[in-house]
Amino acid sequence: MTVKYSYLVYSLAIILVVAAAGCLRPPSDDNLIPATVATPRTPIPEDITCSIFSKTAAYAYNGTSFAFTQKNPPMFINYTVVPKNVTVNRVFTDPNTKQTKTLTYSDYSQTSWFEVTVTNKANGEVILKDGFGAGKGYPAYLSRTLKVLKNGDFDLTFNGNDITATVNVWVKPHGNVEESRVMEFTNCAYMEGQRDTLATAKTTTIEGIILTWTPENQETK
């Protein structure tokens, strides 16, 4: 009697273990949760931005500027720069051999810089001041997009030295210009989420610009 009872208990334990493992019944399709698929964001016509200013210039302690009254932000300021290149000859002493050696490499000139300044004409507040060039304390991105999120009557100024820069300013025609003039804009794009920031530096493709370092600009350090 004890043997039969033990056998029944043992069999019941096996059945419970198998049931817990889900082996008695295959999973039902009704219990499966479908994977979530992200839905692409549909562009809104009112969000389109158009170019209101485009200029390529060589800067030598000079600048250009223009004014615009923004009523429906944001404003995107995209620039691409070609700085002056220098060949640096750095003299150093090898700690192992004690010999004096010269390391030659290419670098951006410390005199090369480009600066974007956006000022509120009503009160003189500097809304934005950023750009390119270690000499000015700016990062070395060759291409970048800045954003102005405020409304106001703005002066936009572009200054630089030993550099060639191409600047494009983009705004939303909707809310910023009269509806009758919207059709005048031909260079338009959806900028939001595409050109907000630049994570890494990239080479420029300005036509006619030589991107190699010029050997005659030599510096010894």
Image (cartoon, helix red, strand yellow):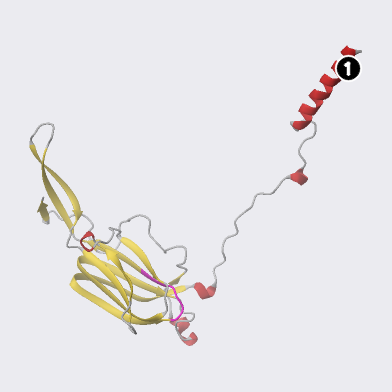
* Side of 176 where 43 appears, left or right: right
The quadrant in which residue 156 appears is: bottom left
Above or below — where is 212 with respect to 14?
below
The quadrant in which residue 211 appears is: bottom left
Residue 14, how many percent across, how many down?
Answer: 79, 23
Q: Amino acid at mark 1?
A: Tyr
Which residue sits at x=28%, y=59%? Answer: 139
The magenta stretch spans residue 76: yes
Residue 6, how many percent across, how many down?
Answer: 85, 16
The magenta stretch spans residue 195: no
Work out whether residue 180 or residue 46 is closer to the camera in this orientation and state it: 46
Residue 12, how many percent across, how many down?
Answer: 83, 24
Work out whether residue 213 or residue 59 is closer to the camera in this orientation and state it: 59
Which residue sits at x=49%, y=80%? Answer: 174
Label 1: few (<14), some (14–19) or many (≥20) C-alpha neighbours in 10 Å: few
Above or below — where is 104 with respect to 141?
above
Identify the image quadrant of the N terminus: top right
Which residue sits at x=18%, y=59%? Answer: 110
Residue 154, how many percent across, how many down?
Answer: 35, 80
* Side of 179 where 158 appears, left or right: left
Picture mark count: 1
Indicate the secondary structure of the residue bearing disc 1.
Answer: helix
Write down the region rendered in magenta.
71-77
Residue furthest to the front in view is: 2
* Side of 166 where 215 appears, left or right: left
Q: Which residue is mark 1?
A: 5
Which residue sits at x=8%, y=34%? Answer: 98
